[in-house]
Image (cartoon, rainbow, N blue to C red):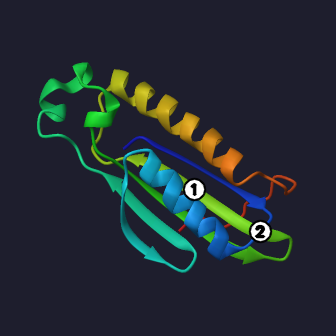
Protein backbone atom coordinates (compact mmCIF):
# COMPACT_ATOMS: atom_id res chain seq x y z
CA UNK A 1 0.00 0.00 0.00
CA UNK A 2 1.15 3.52 -0.66
CA UNK A 3 1.44 5.50 2.59
CA UNK A 4 2.67 8.90 3.75
CA UNK A 5 2.96 9.62 7.48
CA UNK A 6 4.49 12.33 9.62
CA UNK A 7 4.44 13.70 13.15
CA UNK A 8 4.99 17.12 14.69
CA UNK A 9 4.15 19.37 17.65
CA UNK A 10 1.70 22.28 17.42
CA UNK A 11 0.10 24.70 19.86
CA UNK A 12 -3.56 24.76 20.92
CA UNK A 13 -5.88 22.11 22.30
CA UNK A 14 -6.67 18.55 21.25
CA UNK A 15 -10.41 19.32 21.06
CA UNK A 16 -9.98 22.41 18.91
CA UNK A 17 -7.61 20.65 16.56
CA UNK A 18 -9.86 17.61 16.29
CA UNK A 19 -12.63 19.82 14.90
CA UNK A 20 -10.16 21.34 12.42
CA UNK A 21 -8.96 17.87 11.36
CA UNK A 22 -12.52 16.65 10.75
CA UNK A 23 -13.25 19.73 8.62
CA UNK A 24 -9.96 19.26 6.74
CA UNK A 25 -10.70 15.62 5.88
CA UNK A 26 -14.30 16.29 4.82
CA UNK A 27 -13.14 19.14 2.56
CA UNK A 28 -11.05 16.54 0.72
CA UNK A 29 -14.03 14.27 0.08
CA UNK A 30 -13.40 11.86 2.94
CA UNK A 31 -16.06 10.44 5.26
CA UNK A 32 -15.22 10.28 8.96
CA UNK A 33 -15.60 6.60 9.87
CA UNK A 34 -14.44 6.74 13.48
CA UNK A 35 -13.76 9.42 16.01
CA UNK A 36 -12.78 9.43 19.64
CA UNK A 37 -10.94 11.93 21.79
CA UNK A 38 -7.67 12.67 20.04
CA UNK A 39 -8.18 10.41 17.03
CA UNK A 40 -10.00 10.69 13.71
CA UNK A 41 -10.32 7.94 11.08
CA UNK A 42 -11.63 8.81 7.62
CA UNK A 43 -12.07 7.02 4.34
CA UNK A 44 -12.76 7.87 0.73
CA UNK A 45 -14.68 5.14 -1.07
CA UNK A 46 -14.00 4.39 -4.71
CA UNK A 47 -16.54 5.03 -7.42
CA UNK A 48 -17.50 1.65 -8.83
CA UNK A 49 -15.82 2.44 -12.15
CA UNK A 50 -12.63 3.96 -10.67
CA UNK A 51 -10.75 0.67 -10.24
CA UNK A 52 -11.99 -0.50 -13.65
CA UNK A 53 -10.41 2.53 -15.35
CA UNK A 54 -7.19 2.07 -13.36
CA UNK A 55 -4.52 4.63 -14.29
CA UNK A 56 -7.03 6.60 -16.37
CA UNK A 57 -9.24 7.30 -13.35
CA UNK A 58 -8.63 10.47 -11.34
CA UNK A 59 -7.48 9.80 -7.76
CA UNK A 60 -10.76 11.21 -6.45
CA UNK A 61 -12.40 8.06 -7.89
CA UNK A 62 -10.08 5.66 -6.03
CA UNK A 63 -10.14 4.49 -2.38
CA UNK A 64 -7.85 5.93 0.31
CA UNK A 65 -7.95 6.48 4.06
CA UNK A 66 -6.51 8.67 6.79
CA UNK A 67 -5.79 8.41 10.50
CA UNK A 68 -4.94 11.56 12.44
CA UNK A 69 -3.94 11.26 16.10
CA UNK A 70 -3.72 14.19 18.50
CA UNK A 71 -2.18 13.93 21.94
CA UNK A 72 -1.52 16.48 24.67
CA UNK A 73 2.24 16.84 25.11
CA UNK A 74 4.40 18.86 27.45
CA UNK A 75 5.14 21.45 24.74
CA UNK A 76 1.74 21.51 23.00
CA UNK A 77 -0.27 19.00 21.00
CA UNK A 78 1.38 16.09 19.24
CA UNK A 79 0.06 15.38 15.76
CA UNK A 80 0.54 12.05 13.97
CA UNK A 81 -0.97 11.95 10.47
CA UNK A 82 -1.13 9.07 8.04
CA UNK A 83 -2.66 8.93 4.57
CA UNK A 84 -2.81 5.56 2.82
CA UNK A 85 -4.10 4.06 -0.42
CA UNK A 86 -6.85 1.57 0.46
CA UNK A 87 -5.81 -0.76 -2.37
CA UNK A 88 -2.30 -1.54 -3.64
CA UNK A 89 -1.63 0.80 -6.59
CA UNK A 90 0.41 -0.11 -9.64
CA UNK A 91 3.87 1.47 -9.94
CA UNK A 92 2.80 4.56 -11.87
CA UNK A 93 -0.28 5.17 -9.75
CA UNK A 94 1.79 4.87 -6.54
CA UNK A 95 3.65 8.06 -7.48
CA UNK A 96 0.30 9.84 -7.95
CA UNK A 97 -0.79 8.78 -4.46
CA UNK A 98 2.54 9.92 -2.96
CA UNK A 99 2.17 13.33 -4.60
CA UNK A 100 -1.44 13.73 -3.43
CA UNK A 101 -0.69 12.61 0.13
CA UNK A 102 2.43 14.81 0.37
CA UNK A 103 0.34 17.81 -0.72
CA UNK A 104 -2.31 17.00 1.90
CA UNK A 105 0.37 16.62 4.57
CA UNK A 106 1.70 20.08 3.69
CA UNK A 107 -1.84 21.50 3.80
CA UNK A 108 -2.51 19.83 7.17
CA UNK A 109 0.71 21.40 8.49
CA UNK A 110 -0.73 24.79 7.49
CA UNK A 111 -3.91 24.06 9.46
CA UNK A 112 -1.91 22.71 12.44
CA UNK A 113 1.47 24.53 12.19
CA UNK A 114 4.62 22.80 13.38
CA UNK A 115 5.95 24.60 16.46
CA UNK A 116 8.24 21.90 17.82
CA UNK A 117 11.88 21.17 17.06
CA UNK A 118 11.16 18.20 14.76
CA UNK A 119 10.10 15.81 17.51
CA UNK A 120 7.99 12.78 16.73
CA UNK A 121 4.71 13.90 18.20
CA UNK A 122 2.74 10.73 18.66
CA UNK A 123 4.53 7.39 18.28
CA UNK A 124 3.28 5.27 15.34
CA UNK A 125 0.75 2.63 16.28
Q: Is residue 51 above or below residue 25?
A: above
Query: Helix, strand, or loop for circle 2?
Result: loop
- Find out whether the residues at labels 2 and 1 contact each other: C-beta distance under 8 Å: no
Q: Quadrant of the N terminus?
A: top left
Q: Residue at x 41, y 40 (%)?
A: 2
Residue 86 as seen in the image, left or right of residue 119: left
Q: Residue at x 29, y 28 (%)?
A: 90
Q: Position of residue 82 (x, y in %)?
A: 52, 53
| Disc number for residue 81 | 1
Q: Residue at x 18, y 33 (%)?
A: 50
Query: Helix, strand, or loop for circle 1?
Result: strand
Residue 37 as seen in the image, left or right of residue 34: right
Q: Position of residue 78 (x, y in %)?
A: 71, 66
Q: Is residue 8 above or below residue 61?
A: below
Pointer 2 residue: 12
| Disc number for residue 37 | none
Q: Residue at x 12, y 40 (%)?
A: 48
Q: Is residue 75 above or below residue 116?
A: below
State the count of labels.
2
Q: Position of residue 70 (x, y in %)?
A: 63, 69
Camera-side residue: 98 or 77? 77
Residue 98 as seen in the image, left or right of residue 71: left
Quarter location, residue 85: top left
Residue 63 as seen in the image, left or right of residue 65: left
Q: Which mark lies nearer to you, 2 or 1?
A: 2
Residue density around tag 2, few if under 14, some if 14–19, many if 20 or more, within 10 Å: few
Q: Position of residue 113 (x, y in %)?
A: 76, 51
Camera-side residue: 12 or 68? 12
CA distance for labels 2 and 1: 17 Å
Amino acid sequence: MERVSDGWITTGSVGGHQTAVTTFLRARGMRVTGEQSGEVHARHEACWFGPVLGRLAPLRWLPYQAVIKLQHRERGVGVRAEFEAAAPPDGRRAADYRTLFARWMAELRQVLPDTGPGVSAVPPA
